[in-house]
Amino acid sequence: MNSIAQHAAHTAHSSAPPIRVLLADDHPVTLWGVRQLVESAFPRMTVSGTAATCSELMGHSALGQTDVVLLDLALHDGKTLDCMPRLVGERGLKVVVLTGDLNPSHHRAAVMHGARGVVLKSHPAEDVLHAIERIHAGEVWLEGSLVSLLLGSLPGMTAAPAARKDEHACRIDSLTAKERQVIAAGVEYRGAKSLVIADALGMSEHTLRNHLTVIYSKLGVQGKLNLYAYALEHGLARHANGSHASMKPNSQWGALSLDWGPSA
């Protein structure tokens, strides 16, 4: 794009009214941080209001002056999914889910109830802003694994011949034996630093990070927490006693996520 076109695009963007975002989260610190993030993006967007419960959200005086609702999946009154169809159908708003919940089935439920995007709280802050802008423009913001899950739920999509493997099976089949070992070691040695995991696998930290980058690409996941959830859901990881790992949250993985390879 030449300098004239760039100037015209910048002028058009700067003259557009800011995207009005209403924030709903029941954690005061998180709500404060997200508010600072959105307000830092002014004049592209601005905060129209905040809410801590679905009841407060649905009765908020700023709903009529809102374009996008940034909504946590777990609010105090436990009716988040019930709010979405009303926000979308009755109010004509666009909903972006911002959540720390790693369960893909919960993400799918949010989309089926009207959300146009799902962003994990473990993702970079810029992803939140990009998701708001894309969704306000009429697009969606979904990870590849969630898109596959949604497509698989459509009529006719699950009736493929048995010989045709589903998307996840194809992705998993593309993993090498060494990449499977890397995934399994990340769960088995949860809480350990990357050097410990690399030593257990007989490789350098640099080689470990290279393997992780390739694994993220093959599985269509972003970051350590998503890889962990994917491994548990699809049986790619086992506990040291030989049993499959469960989907129960593990605080030790949180420590591991600070050190184990690249974030995306």
Image (tube, rainbow, N blue to C red):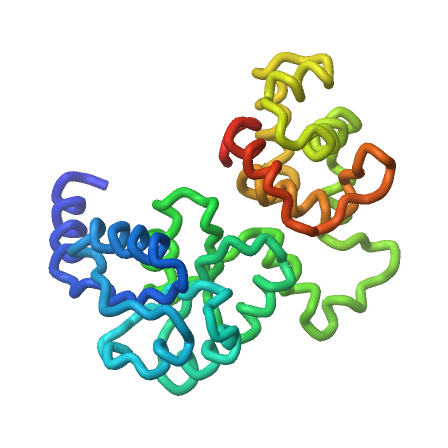
Which residue appears farthest toward the bottom when viewing the image? 90
Query: Relative to residue 152, is residue 70 drawn left or right?
Result: left
Find residue 178 and report its horizontal and vertical position in percent: 75, 24
Find residue 203 and report its horizontal and vertical position in percent: 68, 13
Q: Please say if 89 is above or below 96.
A: below
Query: Relative to residue 158, is residue 26 drawn left or right?
Result: left
61 or 167: nearer the viewer: 61
Quadrant (top left, top right, bottom left, bottom right) of the N terminus: top left
Query: Relative to residue 260, is residue 7 drawn left or right?
Result: left
Find residue 15 and report its horizontal and vertical position in percent: 12, 60
Q: How many marks?
A: 0
The residue at the point 79 percent across, 27 percent down is 177
Query: Relative to residue 121, is residue 152 drawn left or right?
Result: right
Q: Please say if 253 is above or below 132.
A: above
The residue at the point 40 percent across, 80 percent down is 55
The residue at the point 51 percent across, 77 percent down is 79
